[in-house]
Image: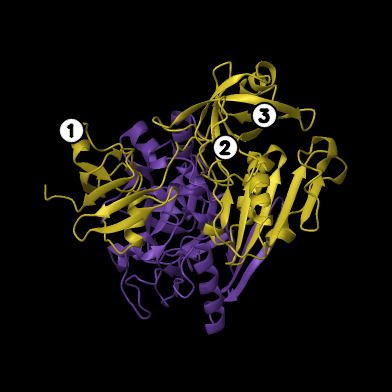
Chain colours: A purple, B yellow
Amino acid sequence: MPGATAGVPPLGRVRALHVYPVKGLSAQPLERVVLRPGEGVPGDRRYALARADGRYRPGLREGLPKQEFHALVSDHRLAGLDTHLDAADVLTVRVAMDTTRHEVLRADLRTEGGRRDARRFFARVLDLPEGAGPEIAHEPGRRFTDAAAAGDGPMGWLSLVNLASVRDLGARTGTTVDPGRFRANVLVDGLPPWSELDLVDSETGQGLRLGGARVRVVRRTRRCAATEVDPATGVRDLPVVRLLDQAYGHQLMGVYLEVLAAGTVEQDDELAA
Amino acid sequence: MSSPPERPGTRHLVLRVAATSDLTPTVRRFVLRDPAGRPLPGYEPGAHVVVTTPAGHLRGYSLVDPGGPAPREYVVCVRRDDRGRGGSRSMHDDVTVGTDLVVTAPANTFALRPAARYLFVAGGIGITPVRAMVRWLRARPGADVRLVYLTRSPAETPFRDELGGPGDTVHHSAGGGRLDLWPYLAEPADDLRLYCCGPPALLRAVRAATAHWRPSRVHTERFAGGTEGASVPFTAVWAPDGRRVQVPADVSLLTALRRDGVRVDASCEAGVCGTCRLTLLDGVADHRDAVLTGPERVGHVMACVSRARTSEIVVGPPRAA
């Protein structure tokens, strides 16, 4: 077991790792991730679909609030697209007809022509006028996470969701909640439900061990209506924020992590004190 | 085909069944006329009426004829569903020629919008509004209309004699298996509109396979029993400058205002956090939030989830607390 320490029982184990190369588009599973201090999952939210009439301008070096981008909270239809961004920044989009997936876009986002194709494609999907398609936002070294609006430190946080809390929400509200709704980088299991909310650590703490890395739980994650969208269908079908509020009196699910010490994290790795 | 029940206040008619006929072993056609022979309220293709069945169910049925300003009759087709909640059984078992039925004036939530080209996908009894639309369009010169009509077998295919021309694909799953719709849906175009009506599984499949289309070009008929509550379009007037913002049924007040350039702060967008509170200056809101107390609801509205009960509401920025 990588990163295991004899004698200290783990709090929980990593069940899945995800990167979201384009804000608002599909999750991409990772087998392992190499974390570095102050940085999130490499390549996470490195692109975003910026509103053409919004505040994003190429070269902007500060975080913007999520409403400056097309994302699931306002444009749930994006979830109906099966997207993949490869290591060379070629974006492939597929749609499903019954059990077959058909490619409807392949665009190299590093080229002017590819970005133009993507812009035209998303103008159509988002029902924007031709020519008012989103800017394909990309700033080397920056990421378009929701937390980035709070500063460059938070921009480098990664997100963790406890599967037990998701199951508890489902059991308490008589629904089935797909953890994919919360678009976390790290899914863990084995912790008691909601215990992750109590792991928020002071600035001086030693933090926790996540696989081979050391992390600090810095903030609880308050949820918005983006979680109402079924990631499998792109249909806004479950009022998750309201269910949270009714069941627990809060709108929290998951926490943000800051990386303190570099290391590799893989499936089944431990989260431990 | 069922549609959401009407809102209160809709005009009701008492119509007499003038004729019935069986289109298939399970689909019966009913011709409804005014007992005194007066012309009926007009309608356009895609419209439906809500019929009170003799057993007391309210059921929406599409009108299968193209319609017009003062039609002499309404024609609906009802598929008997013995596993259903009883509405179709009552129509089949309790209604004969001469029966009087309470029927609402036609409403249209599935209206034809202008386009150069049309693609219709109908599954089973979902053919009823589509038949009205196709006939209306094909009666006009230059119609570019394609129809894909999916049924189980030739015997279970209402209107099969009239639908089967060069622009039509009539496919029967018994024998032919499931038709791959992708060749029809692969290439969206701004001048092409898709109308789809049929069972929920067909609507889901078509919605998924048109995720790359312009959503405004994809029209699907909603079924009864939806959990979302009937959302209807309304107009929001932004008090500071009087601008009129149309809020479509599938778009929130918040999103519609923002699209029009009005800056409204919001956070959860789920009716819980209270950030997007607006002042309600006129009209009646359909409050769907979990924030506002009873007294607060008189003068405020949460733009992210709440809508309007009146065709128009006047809203403005939040008052300083």
Location of mark 3 (residue): B30
In the rendered image, the quadrant that contains the N terminus of chain B is top right
B305 relative position to B79: left or right = left
Residue A26 visible, this angle: no
Q: Tell which of A158 and B77 is nearer to you.
A: B77
| Residue lying at 51% horizontally and 55% vertically, measured from the top left | A77
B255 relative position to B178: left or right = left
Residue A11 in the image: above or below residue A132 = above
Rounded to the nearest whole Å, what is the CA distance between mark 1 and mark 2?
35 Å
User: Which mark sits nearer the N-terminus, 3 or 1?
Assistant: 3
Residue A209 visible, this angle: yes
Location of mark 2 (residue): B223
Crowd class of label 2 (few under 14; some 14 to 19; many from 20; radius 10 Å):
some
The kind of residue tagged 1 is Pro
Secondary structure beneath dot 3 equals strand
Crowd class of label 1 (few under 14; some 14 to 19; many from 20; radius 10 Å):
few
The kind of residue tagged 2 is Phe
Secondary structure beneath dot 2 equals loop
Q: Tell which of A16 and A92 is nearer to you.
A: A92
